[in-house]
Image (cartoon, rainbow, N blue to C red):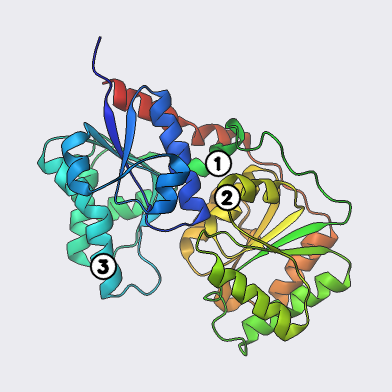
Amino acid sequence: MSKRKTVLLHGSNRNENFGDILLMKIYKKMIEDSGANVIMDRSNEYYSNYLNLKRHSLLYCLLKADRLIYGGGGYFGEPNFPNFRWNIKFLLDHLLPGLLFIILGKQVLIGAVGFGPISNLFLRKLAVLIFKNADHVSVRDEESKNYLLNYGLKKTINVIPDTALTIKTTDFLQTPIPKISIGKILIHFSKDSFPDENSSQFVFFKSLLEELIGRGFSLYFLVDHGTSRRSSNHYREINRKYNFTIPIVEFSTPELTLKNISSSDFVITTKLHVAITSYALGVVPFSIAKHQKTFRFFKQINHPELWCDISLFDNSSKEKILNLIDDNFRLDPDNIILERSMLISGKISEFIEN
């Protein structure tokens, strides 16, 4: 009987963000279902407890693991304004594991990640080197593939939609929260989304909340982060300052967040994976986003009208959201896209078995 393989699962496993945690749980299950053990490098306490994995150093993982799987997420792309600190963290947190596995001659799979842009030429070359030497490469959208091609990668690049779209095939929603009688709308944004509350963007956003409340909708502020105190305090401050009484849905687990999304009629969010999971659950998401990676997703599902650049949010954006809600806009997930997102499971099985 052959020895059970050990796989190092890597992702954005140093934060407590809903989307990243959800992705790591999905990938862990796919790896274990393929007959391998899972370890993670340098994960924080929340990940270790939630995924029931011990916390290990990268050196331990290099010695212990037979293979490396880069799980989904957008960590192979820079923020709108990358700085020196981001460059260093990208190198040490995400490039280093792949480079070391390649040097040691161990196999690497890159699974349905978002890629690009990477403006730093040195980091770009290192990232492309990892992709060049990986045994399987898949990215979550055509734009990611085009970045890799433009950066000089010459190999097969599979486009497999974001793995968070697979949630309907898992047991995350065994007991969904039933929808309430009055339209439930989740509102999700961080303090960083509108840093200046005197800006026209925030003024129009606040006006949107006021109109929705005036029309009798049930609004809820959604916290999507394990280190939720900052988000919760921000929402409390918004409630206090503007005389709102909007309940706050705290974060505890991805499952609870998904249940709250599934019980809603409409979601207004600034985060990609809140939008992606809303779509997968058949709940209409409207994204007010900073990064183009969010637009890539709405383009992929053929609903670019459900996205707005946060810097351009104005009265017409507000009216668009109100019209969608007034018209009782409904969204049926594209089954072809959902089925394609499951392809990564088969790729992982092949990778572990070979």
Residue at 21% over, 61% down: 123
Q: Is there CB contact under 8 Å for labels 1 and 3?
A: no
Residue hosting label 1:
165
**Does residue 10 appear in the picture of this structure?**
yes
- Say which residue label 2 marks: 276
First of labels 3, 2 by sequence position: 3
User: Which residue occupies 54% across, 82% down?
Assistant: 195
Residue for badge 3: 87
For numbered disc 1, what is the local secondary structure? helix
Horizontal side of 16 relative to 68 (left or right) equals right
Answer with left or right where residue 185 lies relative to residue 38.
Answer: right
Q: Secondary structure at mark 3?
A: helix
Q: Is residue 201 left or right of residue 40?
A: right
**Which of the two labelled residues, at mark 1 and mark 3, occupies the earlier sequence position?**
3
- Name which residue type carries label 3: Asn
Q: Nearer the viewer, residue 215 or 161?
A: 215
228 shown above or below 259: below
The answer to whether residue 305 is visible is no
Disc nearer the start of the sequence (1/2): 1
